[in-house]
Amino acid sequence: FERDVIRNFSIIAHIDHGKSTLADRLLELTGTIDKMRKGINQQVLDKLKVERERGITVKAQTASMIHSFDGRKYLLNLIDTPASSSRIVGHVDFAWEVSRSLAACQGALLLVDATQGVQAQSISVFNVAVERGLKIIPVLNKIDLPAAQPEQIAAQMQAAFGIDSAEVIQISAKTGQGVDAVLRAIVERIPPPTGEATAPLKAFLFDSSYDRYRGVISLVNVQEGVLHKGDKIASCYTRKKYEVTDLGIMHPEEVPTTCLRPGQVGYIACNMKESSEAHIGDTLHRAGVPVEPMPGFKPAKAMVYAGVYPIDSNDFVKLEESIKRLTLTDRSVEVMRESSTALGQGCRLGFLGTLHMDVFRQRLEDEYDANVIITAPTVPYKVVYKDRIVTVSNPTEFPDVSDATCQVKEVQEPIVKASIIVPQEYLGEMMELCFSHRAEDLDHRYLDSSGSSGRAILTCTLPLSEIVTDFFDQLKSRSSGFASFDYEDAGYKPSKLVKMIFLLNGKPVDALALIVHRSAEQEVGRAWVKKLHKIIPKQLFEVPIQAAVGRRIIARETLSAYRADVTAGLYGGHHERKLKHLNNQKESKKRMKRVGTVDLPQEAFYDMLKTG
Ligand code: GDP
Ligand code: MG
């Protein structure tokens, strides 16, 4: 295949708008998969279990198709991108994966559901594709549904993306209606890749997987030169040398070929033993013939952290093993050990975003049947001292800024640019929600004008810490489920943050420390102290529960004493009852954590930390 008959493209869409269904239909129409085996092949591109359950494409899958058009054979390479989820947020979680997949494409099908309209993730994936200079083909899906509003949604697409609504292709990925027009548009509108066969080899590595028998299998896009079986290649990143032992195209499973030509997308196996040697975004070249590497990728950067502890501290080794196994398939999770006086030995995990954390948590629970305690998520803060900047993602390590001797110049917190798409009637409610989460630079515009059911897009900046806990749930409930939300990084900003600690009987409890904005310290302090008062069982003596910032006590409740000598009321003859009672006490003692002089049930931590 010469490069003028090659088309490299992705399908980008908000979740459930039909990406997998359209991919299946394209594979079918081009004869890549057999219609008869449809039942089995249903959504061949989505492979992982969690993915299927949650409808999210976590790991990208790629396939090549051969399509005859106007008497010529075209090689269409569909490069799959992980989709964003409407369940939480998506851009930050998978943006870097989307971005790396799109680096191998010249065009993208932008798919929008004709009943749902443009959603927050439609816009964020569109922006990534535009940044990468891709040709966008707008496609309106699900026009077979009675609730479809093709004209209105096409107008929305025009308003949201600045494209001509006449360019929008109307299809039903389910029935196949209009899908041939999509194939035609891929051939006619997307430019072929550039790159010369005679130039020195330059191949872009954009995905990899591990095969027990053959080692690492990488997916590459040959940008220049020709790659043959037996070639000696080297990595720009690690400078290690390899020999290509097998190569071919994904059709949709691996089909060996003799070479991969400029513009082609395919798999290669070389003597790469460890997954860690395959660097996503790496450039491969002929050994001894170095080339300028492709512009690097921003490495995945953890922005949401949480501690994970086994309920039974004896299970730590088992938990750590499960975490290690899971991170083999998802290397963007950061893992560190941490310990807490209250919870014992555990791990601190760093995630790209809240959806990423959620997906990982579910995998961990599937894998590791015993229960784990996951602490409230926190974000990385920058603490600026006179001579250095320290990043702190664990509240216990946060300095007491009210102490004049600690020499902290300022504290900065991560900020995001958020966008919310919502029917106009909920706009006021959404603005209130944002303001109550310290929103700034709030702005909005209308995407269409069909009365209150028309859609508006609201943008603002928010502190990341404000959206990692209950923001999304509130967004959904206060918009009756209609709002869609996404966010992207917007750097750091100085902020008046303080560390709040909780004292039981005068002793601080490390696992309960929080970082809060100064303006919210009273409210937060009072609420938590009330909650602790409810959760902690009475002790044999009176226990003051206090929230403090530095030396200032912000809030206090007093837990009254449990009536002394509980066995006093039992008669001597009622031996059994007495024994039983003592045994019960012993039983529950085991599950208690002693903090200073106070016994805390494990469940108290669980309740507190879980609800953040
Ligand atoms: P993805 O999350 O973007 O991959 O979306 P899927 O391809 O999994 O589709 C989500 C749901 O929409 C599935 O239940 C599909 O059967 C359904 N769907 C996809 N395309 C169409 C269509 O054109 N018409 C109808 N009626 N349903 C569709
Ligand atoms: Mg899908």
Image (tube, rainbow, N blue to C red):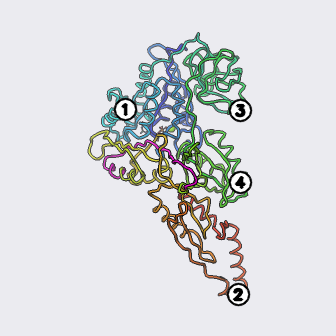
Please say if the residues under marks 1 and 4 sit with CB atoms less than 8 Å apart. Answer: no
What residue does disc 1 label?
161
- Check disc 3 and report its element: helix, strand or loop: loop
Place of residue 156 in the rendered image (x, y in percent of width and height, measured from the top left): 33, 36
Instruction: Look at the image and say whether residue 414 sits in the magenta stretch.
Output: yes
Which mark is drawn over residue 574? Answer: 2
- The amino acid at mark 4 is Phe
What residue does disc 3 label?
274
The N terminus sits in image quarter:
top right
Please say if the residues under marks 3 and 1 sit with CB atoms less than 8 Å apart. Answer: no
- Check disc 4 and report its element: helix, strand or loop: helix
The quadrant of the picture showing ligand 1 is top left
- The amino acid at mark 3 is Glu
Label 3 within 8 A of ligand 2 by Cβ: no
The residue lying toward the viewer, choosing from 320 and 263, is 320
C-alpha span from label 3 to label 2: 68 Å
What residue does disc 4 label?
316
- The amino acid at mark 2 is His
At x 46%, y 47%, the residue is 463
Label 1 crowding class (10 Å Cα cut-off): few <14, some 14-19, many 20+? some
Dot placed on the residue nearer the N-terminal end, 2 or 1: 1
- Check disc 1 and report its element: helix, strand or loop: helix
Q: Which contiguous range is marked in magenta?
A: 404-430
Q: Is residue 47 left or right of residue 211?
A: left
Place of residue 562 in the rendered image (x, y in percent of width and height, measured from the top left): 60, 79
C-alpha span from label 1 to label 4: 50 Å
